[in-house]
Image (spheres, rainbow, N blue to C red):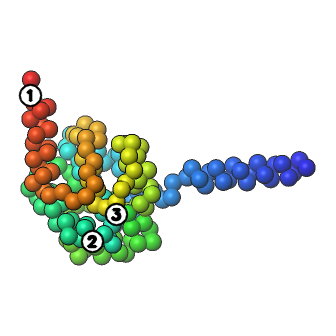
Amino acid sequence: MFTLKKSITHLVLIALLLISAPLQAFSFLDSQKPVNPDSLTGKGRWTLFEIWDSSCHICRKTIHEINRFQAAYPQAQVYGISTDSKRGRQDALNFAREYQLKFPNLLSHFIEVSDYLYSRAGERLLGTPTVMLFTPEGELLAVQPGPVTAQELINFIRKEEQQRNSP
């Protein structure tokens, strides 16, 4: 009886660990080096995360806007976050190459990205593409599901900067 109780306790603990453990860590797409997305924000620059997936048709039609944004607004740091997961890494690499992404990209799983978004904004990831915009201090300022243009991003940041600089 004691060993059965002990075995059941161990199984419950293992199940709880599996449930609470992340599905996979965020890593850089190219190097596969683990990274915490929070370590990329709050460095005195606006930080934009573009969440995308290689199978997303809207991402394929609009990802060039993020390249345009980076070129037109170099004072911001841009990162892509692919939800292709480790299994789809090659698809994500092919996507980044095909669309000539000029910014670093991270790789994760849709559920983990959704959990990350929830922990920062209190909302789940609805789909791709989704933009997360962080202030130079590292605070999440905006989340925008769906496509956005480079000009919309620039206008939003400029308006926010004007409001910050107003007495």
Question: Residue at the spot x=30%, y=76% of the render?
Answer: 94
Q: Residue furthest top?
A: 167
Q: Earlier in the sequence, mark 2 or mark 1?
A: 2
Position of residue 156 measured from the top left corner of the image (x, y, whole percent): 14, 45
SS label for mark 3: strand
Q: Amino acid at mark 3?
A: Ser
Q: Which residue is mark 2?
A: 57
Query: Which label is found at residue 82?
Result: 3
Q: Considering the image in quadrants, where does the C terminus appear? A: top left
- Residue visible at 12% across and 32% down? 163
Q: Quadrant of residue 120?
A: top left
Report how far apart the C-alphas of labels 2 and 1 lie in the structure: 40 Å
Q: Amino acid at mark 1?
A: Ser
Could you say which quadrant of the image residue 104 lies in?
bottom left
Residues 156 and 80: in front is 156
User: Are the two marked residues, 2 and 3, in contact with CB atoms closer than 8 angstroms?
Assistant: no
**Taking 141 as reference, is 102 above or below it?**
below
Q: How far apart are labels 1 and 3 at the CA level?
A: 37 Å
9 lies left or right of 57: right
Residue assigned mark 1: 166
Against 23, residue 133 (above or below) is above
Q: Could you tell me how far apart the alpha carbons at marks 2 and 3 are, in whole angstroms? A: 14 Å
